[in-house]
Image (cartoon, rainbow, N blue to C red):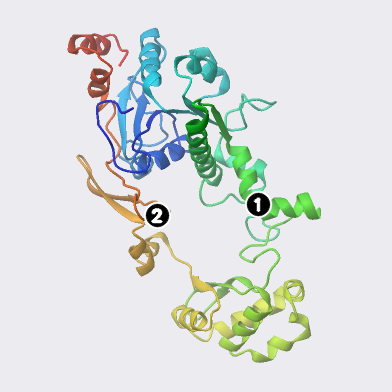
Amino acid sequence: MSFGVGPRPGPLGRFTVVDLTRVRAGPTAVRQLADWGADVIQIETPEPGDGYGGPRHGSDFQNLHRGKRSLCLNLKTSRGIEILKQLVARADVLVENYRPDVKQRLGIGYEALKVVNPRLVYASISGFGQTGPYALRPGFDQVAQGMGGIMSVTGLPGQGPVRAGIPVADLSAGLFCAYGILLALIERETSGEGQWVSASLLEAQIAMMDFQAARWLIDGVVPGQAGNDHPSIAPMGTFRTGDGHINIASAGDVMWRKLCAAVGLDALADDPEFADDAQRTRNRGRLNALLNEALSAHASAHWIERLNEAGVPCGPIYRMDEVFTDPQVEHQQMARSLFHPILGDIQVVGQPVSLSRTPSRIAAAAPEKGQHSTDILESLGYAPDQIDDLKRSGVV
């Protein structure tokens, strides 16, 4: 049920989400729901400051919190909790990233809110999970990167641990949480009941290790740092050209022969040291040196065109300003325009998934703090004098 906004377009337009999240992992989950039409009510403290980890009008905040409505609500007061429960009674989803002990102390854990609304899908994101020896530890992306294994395989051999250039644990935890929320909403159509969805930075980071984790679990191999080279396939990595670097992904014998022909190294195709993937990986140092020498004869653009014509996967290595000027990226509309009443026209990152009939829609810029408090409270039945009283008393 929507709170005073009427039907919304998009595949999730019939759902209302109460957003209690901060920083990145939780807002990443909620952003997926907002972009696909859900009515997201962002609960913010009326106290000074935003507590989101960055300035409200900064690029990060605007990209993370687009498409929401903002309600100021002091959850340290009994009246604030009462209003939250009124919202929950009519909502479909609540998303939070409090530490487990904090939400229990506030009386807004799953068991408490399940009584208010048995159909509620209650989603929690934490650093390490809702239970277990680390449950009460604060969760941070880089800590999860270290514990989840990615820092041990990122960087050049012998370099020492290197964090990924993006908050991969935060982002993947948010995406997995959104996935869990959608699963619970689908299941609710059959059972009529909500349930508790839980995701953590640590679990998400381990899941993102994928084949590297499987190499240990199944093969007993502890993967190490391989730099820009693929850990078990060659030649697959970054190669030097006449004016920079490009990525080449040549896997398997057929692709290997195509690569040799395209770069004028036909004799290497039958070299015993490069007879198969295992041999090429074992002798990667010599192979990469030969390829770098050959590729240095021409500029990156020349090789990208030639290799693609030969059917060898390859591509440029862009800075961020170059990413968004690529014709394919422009065609896919990965930069979406919004109007912000203070910032003017801005661009945010688009959705990477497309639906033919019900596309995503980034409907509005991130809200100002408490921008929709009056509208939302009126939709709950509060009269103007009651709302004024709530504001005077610091509840909203």
Q: Amino acid at mark 2?
A: Ser
Asked whether the viewer can see residue 15, the reply is yes
Q: Quadrant of the C terminus?
A: top left
Tell me where residue 313 sits by quadrant: bottom right
Left or right? Give the position of 86 relative to 172.
left
Is residue 119 positioned above or below 230 on the image? above
Q: Quadrant of the N terminus?
A: top left
Residue at image location 51% in from the left, 14% down from the top: 112
How far from the left and from the top, in percent, is residue 251? Answer: 64, 73
Dot 2 surroundings within 10 Å: few (below 14), some, or many (20 or more)?
Answer: few
Residue at image location 54% in from the left, 15% down from the top: 104
How far from the left and from the top, in percent, is residue 89? Answer: 39, 18
Q: Which residue is mark 1?
A: 210
How far from the left and from the top, in percent, is residue 74? Answer: 37, 16
Left or right? Give the position of 113 relative to 231.
left
Label placed on residue 60: none
Residue closest to the eye, 101 or 184: 184
Q: Amino acid at mark 1?
A: Asp
Q: Which residue is mark 2?
A: 354
Is residue 281 positioned above or below 374 on the image? below
Residue at image location 72% in from the left, 52% down from the top: 214
